[in-house]
Each structure stands twice: as C-alpha cells, then as structure tokens.
Amino acid sequence: MAITETRYRNLHLGTASPDLSDQQGKLESKFKINTKPRRL
C-alpha cells in the first residue's frame, strides 16, 4: 500500500488494494472509519 501526502495537515491517502479487505475491521476501529451510511 502506498501512502500519499496531501496539502492538508495530518491528511494522507492510502491506495486501495484487495489485500486491505482482510484488514478492514482493524483499520475501521483504529482510525474510527465509518463505511456505512447513516440516517439523518
């Protein structure tokens, strides 16, 4: 996975890969990522 810096402070992008599906749960909990839409 390649990490790319952005012009914004503390914001980096990681490239998607099929290998990440195994780590999805760990990444979501570690970085508090919510991939499911929520109702307003």
Image (cartoon, grey):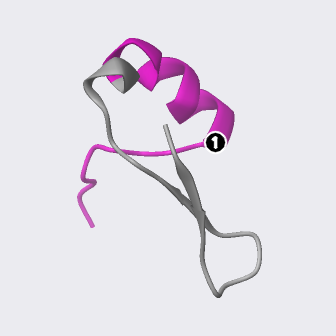
Q: Is residue 7 left or right of residue 22?
A: right
Three-letter amino acid code of the residue under disc 1:
Phe
Question: What's the residue at 31%, 33% (across, down)?
Answer: 17
| Residue interval drawn in magenta | 21-40
The answer to which of 39 and 13 lies nearer the viewer is 13
Q: Residue furthest top?
A: 22
Q: Give the position of the C terminus as an image quadrant.
A: bottom left
Query: Could you say which quadrant of the image residue 32 lies in?
Result: top right
User: Quick check: is 16 in the magenta stretch?
Assistant: no
The residue singled out by tag 1 in the image is 31
Q: Is residue 9 left or right of residue 27?
A: right
Task: Determine whether the residue tagged by mark 1 lies in a helix, strand or loop.
Answer: helix
Question: What's the residue at 67%, 84% (across, down)?
Answer: 8
**Residue 25 on image: x %, y %:** 47, 20
The answer to which of 18 and 21 lies nearer the viewer is 18
Q: Residue furthest right?
A: 9
**Residue 36 on image: x %, y %:** 27, 44
